Image: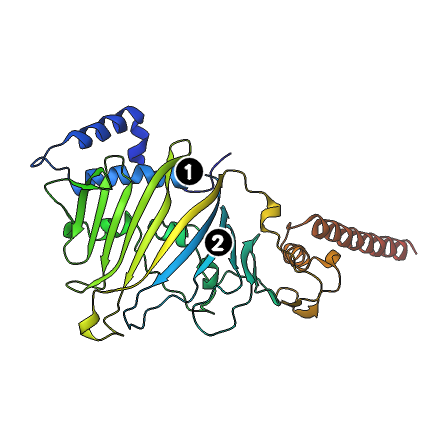
């Protein structure tokens, strides 16, 4: 299948032999002969290129949380939930399932499922009761991509710009390698490798801000981010048990994310203490097999629909109504050449206009002869 993502950077056009030699050289370098930041980024580029080269992906994972006993403001409200992310070109699908009793606070904790979809330039948000269709992507459609966010992968590239910020959204994971390249002169490589979970890693750091542990293949094994220069830690991510999920692409089966207290909210005496931790476990994965049906989430009878494409509000009475597909067809019909129905109607109108013109011409000819 042809990838809808940008082609890898030109450095990869030099061929696999150069990459193998570079990997071997970096793996055998000794203390005092550490690679440059640019050389290590080249290896990371290889991993990112392998991910973005996939025409589609489907990732299903479970998130389990554990709050620390530290009396801080930064807490996680869900004990466990399961997320499914699908992307194919500009099409997005997010499903979040919360089992009964999953909340850690005193709020209602019924079983529920949330859907967010962007498909064929139409967006859906469905909380189980209200089904909202919009003609544009919103920032809430970028939520719940924890598995790729915690790997610091920019999975949002080449998506349409969000139309607005209906619900709070803030990117907390600076992407790699983009962040390093943006501040390249401020990063350095420590002179000695460090063993992490039995794997020797080079350590790239922006002192007091960002520390990255990268192995000889360019796989991120750990990252430590601070709230700002000289500030306490914000988050530490540990990426474990890498496996090849498709040819040339390795992903971690488990991610442990440790979130720390926030200086703006918590007293100084508890700064740099653990607030909560998340364990992200990859359950299933699939690449280059996404279908149109994966993005078509239709509501069950009884659900209220708010269709901002057709500008109607109604309650679903039967499964045959298919509100999402109907809205998409309506949107396509409004675009020139967007659907067969539009082309047929346009052809009929053109035929009517032609007949009218011919009748007028015949009438003029008869008058001239008379």
Asked if residue 308 lies left or right of residue 28, the reply is right
Q: Quadrant of residue 226?
A: bottom left
Q: Is residue 242 visible?
A: yes
Look at discs 1 and 2 and give the one toward the viewer.
2
**Coloured how?**
rainbow
**Residue in view at x 23 percent, y 50 percent:** 180
Image coordinates for residue 86, horizontal then vertical, percent: 50, 48
Asked if residue 197 lies left or right of residue 281, the reply is left
Asked if residue 78 lies left or right of residue 71, the reply is right
Which residue corresponds to mark 2?
Answer: 83
Q: Nearer the viewer, residue 109 or 332?
A: 109
Q: Nearer the viewer, residue 275 or 248?
A: 275
Q: Could you tell me how far apart the alpha carbons at marks 1 and 2 are, in whole angstroms?
A: 23 Å
Mark earlier in primary sequence (1, 2): 1
Which element type, helix, strand or loop, lies under badge 2? strand
Image coordinates for residue 139, horizontal then vertical, percent: 45, 63
Q: Which mark is residue 20?
A: none
Tags 1 and 2 touching, CB below 8 Å: no
Which residue corresponds to mark 1?
Answer: 53
Q: Quadrant of residue 19?
A: top left
Which residue is situated farthest in the right direction here? 370
Asked if residue 46 lies left or right of residue 333, the reply is left
Q: Nearer the viewer, residue 192 or 344?
A: 192
**Residue in view at x 70 percent, y 48 percent:** 340
Residue 220 vs 128, above or below: the answer is: above
Image coordinates for residue 132, horizontal then vertical, percent: 59, 66
């Amino acid at each position: 299948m042809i990838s809808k993502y940008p082609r890898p950077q030109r450095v990869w056009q030099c061929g696999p032999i150069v990459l193998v030699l570079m990997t071997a050289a970096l793996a055998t370098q000794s203390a005092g002969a550490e690679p440059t930041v640019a050389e290590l980024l080249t290896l990371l580029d290889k991993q990112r290129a392998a991910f973005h080269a996939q025409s589609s992906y489907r990732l299903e994972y479970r998130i389990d949380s554990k709050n620390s006993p530290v009396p801080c403001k930064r807490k996680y409200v869900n004990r466990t939930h399961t997320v499914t992310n699908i992307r194919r070109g500009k099409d997005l699908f997010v499903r979040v399932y919360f089992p009964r009793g999953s909340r850690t606070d005193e709020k209602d904790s019924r079983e529920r499922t949330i859907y967010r979809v962007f498909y064929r330039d139409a967006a859906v948000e469905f909380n189980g009761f209200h089904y909202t269709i919009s003609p544009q992507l919103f920032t809430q459609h970028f939520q719940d991509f924890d598995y790729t966010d915690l790997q610091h992968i920019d999975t949002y590239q080449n998506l349409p710009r969000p139309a607005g910020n209906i619900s709070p959204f803030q990117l907390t994971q600076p992407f790699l390698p983009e962040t390093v390249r943006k501040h390249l002169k401020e990063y350095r490589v420590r002179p000695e490798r460090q063993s992490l979970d039995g794997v020797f890693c080079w350590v790239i750091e922006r002192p007091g801000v960002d520390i990255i542990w990268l192995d000889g293949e360019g796989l991120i094994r750990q990252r430590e981010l601070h709230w700002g220069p000289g500030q306490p830690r914000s988050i530490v991510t540990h990426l474990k048990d890498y496996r090849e999920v498709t040819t040339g692409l390795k992903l971690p089966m488990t991610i442990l994310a440790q979130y720390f207290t926030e200086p703006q909210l918590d007293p100084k005496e508890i700064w740099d203490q653990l607030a909560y931790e998340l364990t992200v476990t990859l359950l299933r994965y699939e690449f280059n097999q996404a279908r149109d049906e994966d993005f078509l989430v239709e509501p069950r009878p009884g659900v209220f629909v708010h269709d901002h494409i057709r500008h109607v509000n109604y309650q679903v009475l039967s499964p045959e109504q298919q509100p999402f597909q109907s809205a998409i067809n309506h949107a396509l019909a409004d675009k020139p050449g967007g659907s067969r129905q539009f082309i047929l109607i346009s052809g009929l109108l053109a035929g009517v206009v032609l007949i009218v013109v011919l009748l007028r011409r015949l009438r003029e000819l008869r008058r001239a002869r008379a």
